Each structure stands twice: as structure tokens, then as C-alpha cells.
Image (cartoon, rainbow, N blue to C red):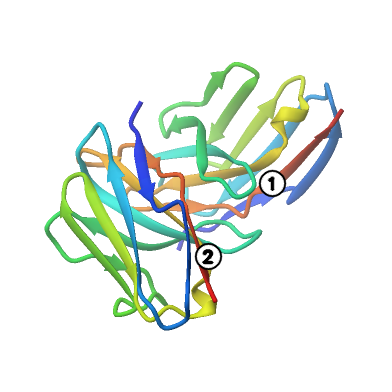
């Protein structure tokens, strides 16, 4: 099956620093990648949709200047949390869609971010 | 705006019981519905995906049904085991994004 990886799996950083999270599709080319955030005991909330070679589309309430998304190739998307604060501590999960249209999304294992 | 609701929010059952998890959604214009399992602190494991044209899907002890017109799906787990303990999430795909329900936290007691 299609495999999506994320790196790092967990990260602890100081308030005010920036953190980059990578999402890779390992055995397929992903035209579209998605970034989700999940707070403790809550469900996943879509943050943004990322298409290769174009600007990401952010959901309402998500600050695009704070959560920088780059989708430079068909197998890699990155999420950079800039000037991180403790309230940004969360579980970040990416997914990738195979090909065009409305096919299944495959999810990465997630990245646990803790901002001190 | 699509809204997805899962009932119950939490469920505790003794081992061996058959159980049903419910998922409802407000907009029936969906392409597919997917059930996931999430263990604490972990990512999502896809269990079953039902296309909008399908009525059900089965995998082992799991059976998921979809009634698109009424905006409902159920996940049936037969002969539950302690290893089934996890949070179960349903998500509907309207074509450009997945909308997740709040999840059902399942505990199967030995």
C-alpha cells in the first residue's frame, strides 16, 4: 500500500523558535498533500491543502504566516511552525492523495510538537 | 459546511461482545467515507473505505455500512477483543477535503 512518512516523529523546542516538519510519500507521487492538527482528546482539524508547485490553501482561522507550507516536489511537503509558542503544541499529521481527483488519502504517522 | 458526528463518544464493553459505532454527516454529497483507528499518541490506521456508490465494506471482523441518503454510517465490530481498544474515527470526503468526526473511544475489557 501507499506509505507516507513524517520527520521528525517528535520535537521539543523553546518558545520563539521555528520548527520544520517533513512529509514524504515514499512509493507514489502525491499531487496533493494535506496538513492536519490534533489537540489532545480532539479530532483532526484540516489546516491546509498543499498542491505541488503552487501556494497552499489554508482553512479559516489558520495563520498562513505562522504555518508555512512548501510543496516543492511530488513526494515532499514541509510545514514550518514559525515563532512557536506553547499553544502551538499539538500533534501534526500529514496525508497525501494519490493522483488526481478524489482518491483515498494516505496518512503519515504524525509529529508530536511540544513548545516549552 | 459538512459536519460529522460520532456516537457514542466513549464505549466500554466486555471482551467478546459485538458492537456498533455510529457516524452521521450533514451533507450527503460525498465521494466516500472512511473509518480509521487511532491508538493513543499514534497516527491513523485506515480500516475501511466505502465509496459513495457502495453500501458496505467488510474486512475480517469489521463491517462498515453507508446510507448516503440518510447521512449515516455504522462500523460493526464482531467478537471484540482487548486489542480493539482504541479511538475510532470516521471521515467523509466531499472531494477536496476530509471532515472528521469527534471519534469514539472504545475500551474492551478482558
| Residue shown at 60% from the left, 50% from the top | B41
Q: Is residue A13 left or right of residue A75?
A: right
Q: Nearer the viewer, mark 2 or mark 1?
A: 2
Which numbered circle lies on residue B104? 1
| Residue shown at 18% from the left, 66% from the top | A55
Residue A50 image point, x, y percent = 25, 58
| Foreground pick, B10 / A21 | A21
Residue A81 image point, x, y percent = 37, 72
Q: CA distance from mark 2 to mark 1?
A: 20 Å
Q: Is residue A100 left or right of residue B17?
A: left
Residue B57 image point, x, y percent = 52, 23
Question: Would you name the residue on which mark 2 appears?
Answer: A90
| Foreground pick, B108 / A116 | A116
Which quadrant would residue A18 be assigned to in this image? bottom left
Respond whether the residues carrying marks 2 and 1 are from the same subunit.
no
Q: Are marks 2 and 1 in contact (CB under 8 Å)?
A: no
Q: Quadrant of the N terminus of chain A?
A: top left
Which numbered circle lies on residue A105? none
Q: Is residue A33 left or right of residue A39?
A: left
Q: Quadrant of the C terminus of chain A?
A: bottom right
Give the farthest residue toward the left: A53
Residue A23 image point, x, y percent = 32, 50
Name the chain under label 1. B
| Foreground pick, B53 / B99 | B99
Question: Is residue B34 positioned above or below A15 on the image?
Answer: above
| Residue shown at 40% from the left, 53% from the top | A8
| Residue shown at 69% from the left, 46% from the top | B104
Which quadrant would residue B109 be assigned to in this image? top right
Q: Callout 2: helix, strand or loop?
A: strand
Amino acid at each position: 500500500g501507499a506509505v507516507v512518512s513524517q520527520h521528525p516523529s517528535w520535537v521539543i523546542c523553546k518558545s520563539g523558535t521555528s520548527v520544520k516538519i517533513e512529509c514524504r510519500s515514499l512509493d507514489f507521487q502525491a499531487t496533493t498533500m494535506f496538513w492536519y492538527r490534533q489537540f489532545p482528546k480532539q479530532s483532526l482539524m484540516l489546516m491546509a491543502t498543499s498542491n505541488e508547485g503552487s501556494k497552499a490553501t489554508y482553512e479559516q482561522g489558520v495563520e498562513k504566516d505562522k504555518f508555512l507550507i512548501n510543496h516543492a516536489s511530488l513526494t515532499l511537503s514541509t510545514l514550518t511552525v514559525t515563532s512557536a509558542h506553547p499553544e502551538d503544541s499539538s500533534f501534526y499529521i500529514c496525508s497525501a492523495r494519490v493522483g488526481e481527483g478524489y482518491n483515498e488519502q494516505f496518512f503519515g504517522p504524525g509529529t508530536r510538537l511540544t513548545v516549552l | 459546511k459538512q459536519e460529522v458526528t460520532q456516537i457514542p463518544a466513549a464505549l466500554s464493553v466486555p471482551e467478546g461482545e459485538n458492537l456498533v459505532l455510529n457516524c452521521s454527516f450533514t451533507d450527503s454529497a460525498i465521494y466516500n467515507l472512511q473509518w480509521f483507528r487511532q491508538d493513543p499518541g499514534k497516527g491513523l490506521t485506515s480500516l475501511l473505505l466505502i465509496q459513495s456508490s457502495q453500501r458496505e465494506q467488510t474486512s475480517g471482523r469489521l463491517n462498515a455500512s453507508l446510507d448516503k441518503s440518510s447521512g449515516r454510517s455504522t462500523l460493526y465490530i464482531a467478537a471484540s477483543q482487548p486489542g480493539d481498544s482504541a479511538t475510532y474515527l470516521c471521515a467523509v470526503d466531499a472531494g477536496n477535503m476530509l471532515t472528521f468526526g469527534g471519534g469514539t473511544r472504545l475500551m474492551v475489557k478482558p
